[in-house]
Amino acid sequence: MSLLEVEELRTGYGALPVLQGISFSVEEGQTAVMFGLNGAGKTTTVNALAGLLPIWSGDVRLDGKSLKGLDAPKIVAAGIGLSPEGRRVFPALSVLTNLRLGAWTRKSAGRKQADDTIARVFEYFPRLEERKDQLAGTMSGGEQQMLAIGRAIMSRPRILMIDEASLGLSPKLAQTVFQVVSQINDDGTTVVIVEQNVGVLPYADQALIMEKGTITYDGSGADLEKSGDLRKTYLGDASDLH
């Protein structure tokens, strides 16, 4: 049994369908990367897994237990954390307060566990510790991305989902973020990344390609990396990778 199982998932916005019955699974301890152009359905997928969109039909199971019908806070408590597209940090609050808000679903665990998790976040992203009293809205895009990932870690998820981890970052900073996410995975957290940047591919145990609300490829990252012209493999000649 896989840690995450998605079966014939259909959902969308209002009356507009986006996901056309997708199915995939992610094994515990792996990093899965979902590629595809804008509008392919990647963000819709992780938002549905996080409880931000209703499941119209199909099912999502975490460790064999269905998440269908659960709201976002209950899904976070069950073990799925999301670093959303656009980061969505609280700009008028400090870095430290942003992190503490990420632990609110675990408030019953007590202050010590939250403090221990903050220390762990600072190990991954030392720059956040240097700026712990700074307002999040005054930070650079890269620092805000680190904060968004750190905030998602605060719920101590079994699966960490990151939507567009490298969006707006320089190639060098994007690689730094990918390396830290790889370390988070090595420390035992299963990771699902939504990306257009193929620079993340060396870190992918599993690669998924989405097109028009369907999954057109589900295989190992290594096999996809060796497949030749990666752009033509799933984006055609009009690819817009950065």
Image (tube, grey):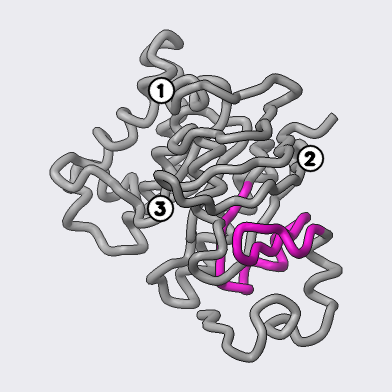
First in sequence, mark 1 or 3: give its number: 1
Residue 6 in magenta?
Answer: no
Q: Position of residue 139 (x, y in %)?
A: 23, 58
Q: Is residue 120 visible?
A: no
Q: Position of residue 149 (x, y in %)?
A: 44, 46
CA neighbours of label 2 inside 10 A, class few (<14), some (14 to 19), many (20+): some
- Say what amino acid the circle numbered 1 marks: Ala
Q: Nearer the viewer, residue 53 or 1?
A: 53
Q: Residue furthest left?
A: 92
First in sequence, mark 1 or 2: give its number: 2
Residue 202 in magenta?
Answer: yes
Residue 190, above or below 167? above
Q: Say which quarter of the image contains residue 190.
A: top right
Q: Tags 1 and 2 in contact by the CB under 8 Å rule?
A: no
CA neighbours of label 3 inside 10 A, class few (<14), some (14 to 19), many (20+): many
Labelled disc at residue 114: 1
Q: How many marks?
A: 3
Q: Which residue is mark 2?
A: 27
| Stretch in magenta | 192-218
Q: Which residue corresponds to the image point at 68% horizontal and 36% vertical from the top-left?
A: 188
Q: Nearer the viewer, residue 22 or 175?
A: 22
Q: Nearer the viewer, residue 225 or 94?
A: 225
- Say what amino acid the circle numbered 2 marks: Glu
Q: Which residue corresponds to the image point at 36% horizontal and 15% vertical from the top-left?
A: 111
Q: Which residue corresponds to the image point at 61% horizontal and 58% vertical from the top-left?
A: 213
Q: Position of residue 226 (x, y in %)?
A: 84, 77
Q: Which residue corresponds to the image point at 36% horizontal and 63% vertical from the top-left?
A: 142
Q: Which residue is mark 3?
A: 146
Question: What is the C-alpha distance between the residues marked 3 and 2?
Answer: 25 Å
Q: Tags 1 and 3 in contact by the CB under 8 Å rule?
A: no
CA neighbours of label 1 inside 10 A, class few (<14), some (14 to 19), many (20+): many
First in sequence, mark 3 or 2: give its number: 2
